[in-house]
Amino acid sequence: MRRALRTMEARALEAIEREKGGGLRIVSASVGVRGISALTWLRSRPDLTRFYWSGRDDNETVAGLGVADRWGSVDGCTHLRKKFSKRLQNAAPSCRYYGGMAFDQSGPKKQPWNAFGTCQFILPRFELRSDGHNSKLICNMVFPQDAEDREALVREFVWPALPPVSVDAPLPFSIGRTDRPDEIRWAAMVERALRAFRQPELCKVVYARRARFRMDAAMDPVQLLGNMIAHRKGSFQFFFQVADGPAFVCNSPERLFRRLNGDVESEAVAGTWPRSGSIEEDDRRACQLMACKKERHEHELVRMGLQEQLAPHLTAMDVDSKPAVMRLASSLHLHSKLHATVRAGVTSLDVLAGLHPTPAVGGYPTKPALAEIRAEEPFDRGWYAGPVGWIGCDAAEFAVGIRSGLIKGDELTVYAGAGIVQGSTAEREWQEVEHKIGSFMQMIGLHGCCALVSEP
């Protein structure tokens, strides 16, 4: 590792000399490495901003440490798009900014989300990228600022020895759980939504719940990430921790969109039933899910809303004529794919801003659904259900930040939601959310240790 860092430092210094005196430019220096675990590497620098990303459909994983450049806002990111787009235009094709956005862009984030802001994207100083066969270590540099402060850049190459591969400590045990809303408040929220559906202005609203677990010891976020990585198949995985702050982790089945040059893919994922553990029973449930009028209606609202939101930005849209069943480790979902072409002059940031929030996590139509959520949900979602992923000059990939939790010291807060439409019942939707919370806890290794203690 130290040899790789010395080699990369030499290449970085060469880049400084080459780029000296030029204008805005983002370049990278890289070196091939072997035998470095992403988790061990992330653990080596808990003092730095850390992240991890893996896509759903490929073997690429990316771990990052430190910040070469940061773009963000505490009170909305609409005004950042023009300046950020210029930044991306001056980046090498391989450069990526990683990060996410809050579900609700309407104002500053409160504790414990204030460290994340309404949106935040970082160009990591160091990246460890692997495609499953080969790995490379990358140093990202932004000129002219890194050339002007050459000594500060050199100091970042002073790296502590990697810790030995350690046996993970026993996971802490939960000593309490509080839910917001509680079951009584949840029932009132669902009844309010069902009454609202009698008017044509609102067809669907997605309500979320927050389950906060207090543990008997502080948690290692990277350890929980490692448990989550074991469940990588069929999901996007995202980890983001501001230096010395809380860590957000998610294992999302849902793509928001992927762009490669002019081509864009997106998808509608809505309509959820739990799996049974039996292949034969799951086949039967899949058929019932496809035939369920309520679930098909919920899915159709999401698919219709997706097309409406993308229409100003994309053309030549091709959408599946009927949904298929997506089978995940613990759930079955109705799933439809969309392919399209970006209109001239439209950037990935334009697509991102136009697409979020989809009806899968907000509701339909969007504005009245968001008004319901703001009026009824008794907490700030933060980055839960917001876009998470990466963006480059001509490519981008974002997942929806669901199946997620926030880790801070001895507290773990898990978020999950359910789409409410005509035909929904409070009890069934409560159980759906409880299933999602339990599945997330099982995935990170903490299932079965949490008693329910509801808040007023």
Image (spheres, rainbow, N blue to C red):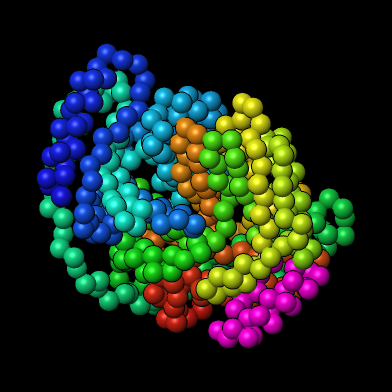
Residue ID at (52%, 55%): 401
Q: Is residue 27 visible?
A: yes
Residue 356 placement (x, y as % from top left): 62, 45
Residue 92 placement (x, y as % from top left): 38, 30
Residue ID at (52%, 73%): 329
> Looking at the image, which is closer to me, 186 or 258?
258
Residue ID at (25%, 71%): 168
Residue 131 placement (x, y as % from top left): 36, 53
Q: Residue furthest top?
A: 21
Residue 434 placement (x, y as % from top left): 58, 74
Q: Residue furthest front?
A: 133
Residue ID at (52%, 48%): 398
> Looking at the image, which is closer to me, 330 or 211?
330
Q: Is residue 290 magenta?
A: yes
Name which quarter of the figure residue 167 lies in.
Answer: bottom left
Q: Which residues are magenta?
A: 271-295
Q: Is residue 430 magenta?
A: no
Q: Is residue 68 above or below residue 401?
A: above
Q: Is residue 75 visible?
A: no
Q: Is residue 187 above or below residue 339?
A: below
In the picture, the quarter occupied by the C terminus is bottom right
> Looking at the image, which is closer to me, 423 or 208?
423
The majority secondary structure of the magenta stretch comes to: helix
Name which quarter of the figure residue 232 lies in.
Answer: bottom left
